Amino acid sequence: MLSHASVLLALLLAAAPWPSPEARVSVLPLPPLASRIRIAIDAGHGAPGNTGNWGCHCQSEADETLVEATELSRRLRRFGFTVLDTRTTPLGAKYPARIADIEAFKPHLVVSLHTDARADAWPHETNPDGGVCFSNPKDPGFAVLWSEEGSDAIVKRRETWGRAVSHELRAAGFLPYSGEDYGSLYRDDDEPACFVDARPIKQRVYFLRATSVAPVIIVETHHALDPVEVDRWHEGATHEAFAAAIASAALKVVENR
Ligand SMILES: [Zn+2]
C-alpha cells in the first residue's frame, strides 16, 4: 500500500506541467509501418546570413534546430521512414535550394523545425564576446504553423498534417503554446497550438508557401528564451518523445491509422 507521502508525491509529479523538470513526456506507441513513408526534415535557418533567433544561453536558433533535426531524422529512419535532411551542417543551403531538394525527393510530408523568441525578455547571460542574451521564463510550449496560400487541396493537406502533429505532441505531454504573442501574424486554428500564416501576402513565410508538392508545416518546438524549456530540449527523452509523436502523426495522415 502506498504511503500518504508517496501518494502526495505522485500527485505533485502528475500535476507538474511541461516544461517543469518533474513533468514527463511519453513515447507514443507506434505500429509497424505498412509503407515507406517519405518525410523531409528541415533544420530551420542556417542559410548564409540567417542564424534565426538568439536564446537565453546565447544559443542560435540555427544550431538548436540542427540538433533537433538530426535527432528526429535518426529516429524516424530507425522507425522505417525514408528521410530527406535539408541541412546537415551549421551552414546549409538557402531556402529555394532546399525547396528544390524537397521537390526532387517527392515526400509525403515536410516538417521544418524552429524555435520561438517570445515577448519581452530580460538580460540573462553574457556571452564570451560580451554580448548580452535575454530570457523570458514565461510563454513556453510548442506551436505548429502552416500557410493557407495555394489550392484548397494543398491547404487541406497542410491543415490535416499540422493538426495531427499538434494532437500527437499534446498526447505525448508537450505543452501547447497559447499564441498570445503572435498578435495579428497568425490566425488561430480550431486545434490548440495551431496557427495559420495570415500576414499580407508579400510578408508571408516563404518556406510555408513555396511548394505544393507536399504539405509543409513549421513546428516551433519550444521557447528559446525560457531556460527551463531549453534544458528539457537537451534531454534524450524529449527527442525520443518528439520523434514518436511526429511518427505517429505521419502514420495517421499517410496511412490513416
Ligand atoms: Zn525560426
Image (spheres, rainbow, N blue to C red):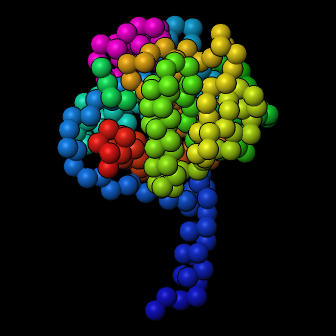
Left or right: 41 with respect to 146?
A: left
Residue 187: x and y, percent? 68, 32
Q: Which residue is nearer to you in this view: 171 or 46?
A: 171
Is 87 contained in the magenta span?
A: yes
Is 134 contained in the magenta span?
A: no
Q: Which residue is nearer to you in this view: 35 or 230?
A: 35
Label count reads: 0
Q: Tell me where residue 134 sits by quadrant.
A: top right
- Residue 116 appears anywhere in the view: yes
Q: Which residue is nearer to you in this view: 13 or 219?
A: 219
- Residue 51 appears anywhere in the view: no
What are the residue bounds of the magenta stretch?
84-105
Query: Residue at horizontal 74%, vertical 35%?
Result: 181
Q: Tell me where residue 126 sits by quadrant.
A: top right
Query: Residue at horizontal 30%, vertical 52%?
Result: 30
Query: Residue at horizontal 45%, vertical 26%?
Result: 153
In the orientation shown, which residue stands out farthest toward the bottom?
A: 1
Q: Tell me where residue 250 sits by quadrant.
A: top left
Left or right: 49 with respect to 97?
A: right
Left or right: 193 with respect to 2?
A: right
Left or right: 95 with respect to 70?
A: right
Residue 4 higher or lower than 50, as above or below: below
Residue 200: x and y, percent? 70, 16
Residue 223: x and y, percent? 63, 38
Query: Residue at horizontal 25%, vertical 43%?
Result: 79
Residue 89: x and y, percent? 39, 18
In the orientation shown, which residue stands out farthest toward the front?
A: 152
